[in-house]
Amino acid sequence: MRHNDLEDGERPLRICFFGTYRANYVRNQVIIHGLRSQGAVVYECHAQLWHSVADRVAQASGGWRNPKFLLRVLRAYLQLLRTHTQMPAYDIMLVGYPGQFDVFLGRLLSWWRRKPMALDILMSLHLIAEERGLTKKSPFTGKLIFLLEKIGLKLPDLLIADTPEYQEYYCQKYNLSPKKFKLVPLGVDDRIYFPRPDLHPPTDHFRVLYYGTFIPLHGIETMLRAAALLQDDPTIQFDFYGDGQERKKVEQLAKDIQLKNVHFRGWIDKEDLPGEIAKSHICLGVFGTTKQSLCTIQNKIWEGMMMQRPVITGDADTIRQELAHGQHVYLVDRENPQKLAAGILQLQASSDLRQKLVDNAYIRVQQNRIVALGARLQKILFDRVNQ
């Protein structure tokens, strides 16, 4: 181990948080503020490349061939290059999510500074493209994403994943060594998501809340078919907040099966969402069976726990490694509307069970707060710098 002022504790760890990462995405916000909460100095070297989720989908479907987009990419990376030349001295570069393509420039710049580079992978860009059907729309684009991700994941000195399952997936798919990985679970932005004791669920009905992107991994069709099984009970009402590629499809399904207990509320601002969570009796997690769905514990699960609302979600080995059924969350078989409907009925019938979930989950989720995740990640980065 090298002897230096960082090792001696004479100064804080200095990190260059690099890339075209999604600046307001929960993972990136938690990491940046978590590291700063530990006294680390985080310099942001960022350039905006993507305008929205729809923009990323359009480019991954083959739109990247448009010269205007290629010019946008060039401008973004030139901005990163200029910003990096003005960056103060740092100890390690950390490429934010999504950064599998940013590591090519990041590797050159970190080598130039003679510093190690880490990548927070979080989610496989190729897997996302596969599950959203984008690789079928543009097979060549799919092969290109696969190749770039495969090469890109070999460039960093350190790879950060959120679950052992995702780590194993990457190792098998891209022939990577597990020794290159460290695990940092998803965190919850407890600056936004925290208990609201002054807000309460309605007293005239049992409110079931879903929020998020309308994509296959979330299993929204399973939720709607569970709602159909509960339609004879007018006291159970479902509110859906969000948008996404499957929104028209699921809204049409709700019309086709004539759901009267489901209400689509559209997109909701992040600042307004906690209030709606607080005014629900239970929150729905994810019920899809895609690889992505099974490899991670989604943000909405931790957020519901932090908001002190019971969460019912699909069962998976990934979840059971961290959370216990009937203790922290209520788990049901995935893609099984009957089991989901039965779980909702049990939670409706037992306020004691709901309170038990809330109490235990709130204790457990403290490990995923910004400060806790920041401490964990800072130690990982500190150890890598001092190898």
Image (tube, rainbow, N blue to C red):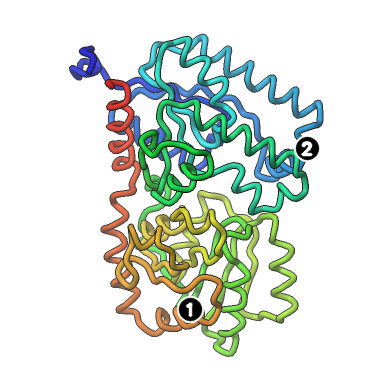
Where is 12 relative to 65, above or below? above
Distance from Cα at disc 2 to Cα at disc 1? 44 Å
- Which amino acid lies under the numbered mark 2 shown in the image of this protein? Gly
Which residue does the image show at 58% across and 35% down from the upper left? 149
Q: Is residue 197 left or right of residue 363?
A: right
- Is residue 188 shown to the viewer in this render? no
- Viewer-side residue, 44 vs 153: 153
- Viewer-side residue, 379 vs 181: 181
The residue at which mark 2 appears reads as 63
Disc number placed over residue 179 in the picture, else none:
none
Residue 1 point in image, percent of width and height: 22, 18
Q: Indicate the quadrant containing the C terminus: top left, top right, bottom left or bottom right.
A: top left
- Which amino acid lies under the numbered mark 1 shown in the image of this protein? Phe
Disc 2 on helix, strand or loop?
helix
The residue at which mark 1 appears reads as 206
Residue 119 point in image, percent of width and height: 46, 31
Which residue does the image show at 44% across and 27% down from the upper left? 94
Residue 69 point in image, percent of width and height: 75, 29
